Amino acid sequence: MATAAVKETKTAITPKKKTKPSRLCFTPPVNLKNNKKNIYYTRYDCIGEGGFARCFRVKDNYGNVYAAKVIAKRSLQNEKTKQKLFGEIKVHQSMNHPNIVGFVDCFEDSTNVYLVLELCEHRSLMDLLRKRKHLTEPEVRFLMLQILGALKYMHKKRVIHRDLKLGNIMLDESNNVKIGDFGLAALLVDDEERKMTICGTPNYIAPEILFNSKEGHSFEVDLWSAGVVMFALLVGKPPFQDKEVKTIYKKIKANSYKFPRGLEISNEAKDLISSLLTQDPSTRPSIDAIADHAFFHTGYMAASLPDEVLDQKPTWP
Ligand code: ADP
């Protein structure tokens, strides 16, 4: 069996830089302060690193524990990168949903910008797949419903996430989904606006972003990525995965993916994935139609995920 989804970098879309921006972020001081609000934070261990930021566990002076996403000011030298961060903060601050990482606070010192976020103790679905290889259908049913709930909320607020992927879908201490990283999100002025920027992560990027750039794209790109996520959770790797980005794009264009033999995947799951991975965005189902799909009404539906899922295939009643 192929290994879990490998790297999820945005390198093919964002021009390569000599230094990964997050490398410019040294470990911040142990004592941090939001001067405007007079809140003190103690910085603990590093819990993750992305393309731009490093993430540390922090505790405020009231004893609340959070994740602080730290972005080095040295990596914000060009206007585009600054605007990207302002955009991320503006959109993320406006989100309030149980399946979206809570935005708690934001401040800066002379070296860094700090985004204080709800802590996702159980890391990302990428980390989960590294351990588990692939998940069972009841687990995927549970996770997908929470992902769809968060997407429905975002889309209602006219926000397109545009970077939905295993690494940006985290789990809290009760194993509930928390979608994070609004670094590529777009806030539309109205439902009819089309976005023209080519952005995303190669394995997850919708075909209309790559091949129909004149017409632009909209909310449906997140549903395509949700289809890629669902396939990856059941199979252990994204459907169009390849070493070469060019080949990934060719496979996306040809809609060429296969369910590996030897894995038991229900026809309902296959049917839902194929409807999400529909080339024409206008024929992708609405979020309500997806939630009505037979996949969510056949088989075991868990009310929560036990901690056992973090290490091994769970036993359902
Ligand atoms: P970037 O914008 O550089 O891609 P991310 O938002 O992806 O940064 O954060 C980098 C890493 O930090 C993530 O891959 C994840 O491992 C970890 N991380 C981010 N947010 C949280 C959080 N709220 N709780 C726990 N870990 C987090």
Image (spheres, rainbow, N blue to C red):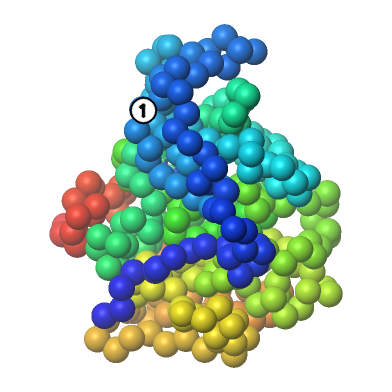
Percent position of residue 241, x then y: 46, 78
Does residue 54 appear anywhere in the picture?
yes
Q: Is residue 197 left or right of residue 140?
A: right
**Tag 1 residue:** 44
228 and 111: which is toward the camera: 111
Q: Is residue 254 above or below residue 112?
A: below
Measuring 43% from the left and 12% from the top, which residue is drawn there? 61
Residue at 49% x, 50% y is: 50
- Count of labels in the image: 1
Q: Amino acid at mark 1?
A: Tyr
Depth order, front residue of 268/88: 88
Tell me the quadrant of the picture where the C terminus can be found: bottom left
Quadrant in which the N terminus appears: bottom left
In the displayed structure image, the side of residue 158 where residue 46 appears, left or right:
left
Other-residue count near label 1 (Cα within 10 Å), few / some / many at <14 / 14–19 / ≥20: some
Residue 97 showing in the rendered view: no
x, y percentage for residue 87?
71, 43
Residue at image position (30%, 62%) is 130
In the image, the residue with mark 1 has its CB under 8 Å from the nearest atom of ligand 1 = no
| Location of residue 166 by image quarter | bottom left
Task: Look at the numbered disc 1 and give the secondary structure of its residue.
Answer: strand
Residue at point 54%, 43% (across, down): 24
